[in-house]
Image (cartoon, helix red, strand yellow):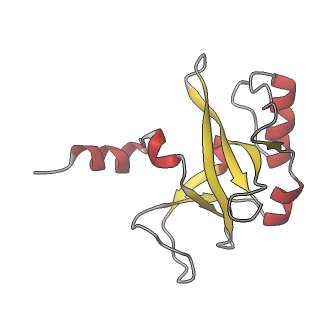
Amino acid sequence: MTDVRKITEEMYGIVLASKIIGEKVYNRQYEDLGKIHELVIDAKEGCIAYAVLSFGGFMGMGNKLFAIPWKAFEFARPEHTLLEITKPGDKLMLNVDKEKLKAAPGFDQDAQWPDFADRTWGNSIYNYYGYATYWKP
């Protein structure tokens, strides 16, 4: 019998949030950029607004969080032999240089998080990463 869920995922890109949270993220240079800490949903618009990436620190200590437009991520098959592959299938890729991420506006996990509904703040984040906001036509 055919696994309907697998066919649906391949055709439409439907993925459970629980499969994305905690997933390692790499850039085009196959550098480890951290892990997805959280997904921010815009319930009114019916879409993922941001993925919150945990990056930096040492052994999970001192990590900084970064809200990144969901459009900046893509699933890609790893082709590089040096890429750590913990499970088969696609990997979450972010086309951002490690130095740009280090300089990006971020926040601490234990501090007050940004107001994700603030469109002025959102504009600055989307502009930083070079993406058009999803809330403008």
Left or right placement of residue 41 versus residue 112 in this view: left
Is 114 on the left or on the right of 22, as rendered?
Answer: right
- Please indicate whether residue 121 sits to the left or right of residue 17 in the image: right
Figure check: 133 above or below 3: above
Which sits in the foreground, 12 or 60?
60
x and y percentages locating residue 77 in the rendered image: 48, 67
Q: Residue lying farthest left?
A: 1
Q: Which residue is located at x 80 percent, y 47 percent?
A: 130
User: Foreground residue, 56 or 17?
Assistant: 56
Q: Farthest residue in the bottom direction?
A: 81
Coordinates of residue 105 in the picture (x, y in percent): 87, 45
Tell me the quarter of the picture where residue 35 sits: bottom right
Measured from the top left, where is residue 124 in percent x and y? 87, 36
Residue 93 in sight in this render:
yes
Task: State whether residue 5 is above or below residue 85.
Answer: above
Quadrant the C terminus occupies: top right
Q: Is residue 27 visible?
A: no
Q: How many marks?
A: 0
Residue 28 drawn above or below residue 66: below
Instruction: Residue at 79% x, 65% y: name it.
Output: 98
**Front position in the image: 38 or 29:** 38
Q: Position of residue 8 (x, y in %)?
A: 31, 43
Q: In the image, is 1 to the left or to the right of 43? A: left
Q: Quadrant of residue 50?
A: top right
Q: Residue at x 46, y 61 (%)?
A: 90
User: Where is residue 15, by image quadrant?
Assistant: top left
Residue at 22%, 44% in the rendered image: 4
Residue 48 vertical placement versus 59 (above, below) = above
